[in-house]
Image (tube, rainbow, N blue to C red):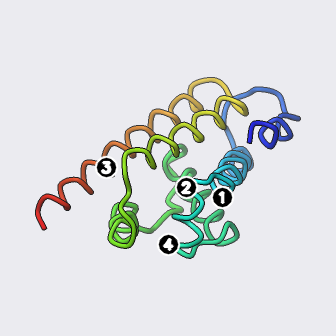
Amino acid sequence: MVNQIALKLTQSHTDITTRADIENLVETFYDQVFADKLLAPLFTVVAHVTLATHFPLMADFWETILFAKNRYHSNVILKHIELHSKQLLEPVHFEQWNSLFCLTVNALFTRPIAEAAKTRARTMSMVLQAKLHTLANTH
């Protein structure tokens, strides 16, 4: 896993400033996710997502989050509720996702926007888990 990230380290350790930086982050990160024994089945078996279809959506998502561009038009919470209805999303899934995300960001970037990306990822994880927990307790 770390070796795949190391291959991407041909650039200098700078901040996330362009769409190309986001694409590099998303591609490197999801290469890790799709190779991860815990997370990969959620994408490939349960959600039937391919890297080719997920990559552009996630690049749009992160460009919207980090650069306030209006690129991502789906509802993240509804997507995760739908996935949760097929396969319970446990705290360990979110912990692993966050761990891989932070590892990838740290390997590729430094500075304020990179730190903001990690903070936003952790915050979204907590919100999603809270929503899924609330939903489970109301049914």
Q: Secondary structure at mark 3?
A: helix
Report which quarter residue 51 is drawn in: bottom right
Report which quarter residue 40 is drawn in: bottom right
Image x and y of residue 80, in percent: 38, 63
Report which quarter residue 102 is drawn in: top right
- Residue furthest toward the bottom? 48
CA distance for labels 3 and 1? 21 Å
Residue visible at 58% across and 65% down in the picture:
57
CA distance for labels 2 and 1? 7 Å
Q: Earlier in the sequence, mark 2 or mark 1?
A: 1
Mark 2 crowd level (few <14, some 14–19, many ≥20, 10 Å Cα) = some
Q: Earlier in the sequence, mark 2 or mark 4?
A: 2
Image x and y of residue 117, in percent: 53, 37
Residue visible at 35% across and 65% down in the picture:
84
Q: Earlier in the sequence, mark 3 or mark 2?
A: 2
Horizontal side of residue 113 vs 123, given as left or right:
right
- Tell me the kind of residue under disc 3: Gln
CA distance for labels 2 and 4? 10 Å
Residue beneath disc 4: 46
Residue beneath disc 2: 39
Mark 3 crowd level (few <14, some 14–19, many ≥20, 10 Å Cα) = some
Q: Secondary structure at mark 1?
A: helix
Tag 2 and tag 1, C-beta contact below 8 Å: yes
Q: Measured along the vertical axis of the image, is residue 106 above or below residue 66? A: above
Residue beneath disc 1: 34
Tag 4 and tag 3, C-beta contact below 8 Å: no
Horizontal side of residue 134 vs 103, given as left or right:
left
Residue beneath disc 3: 129
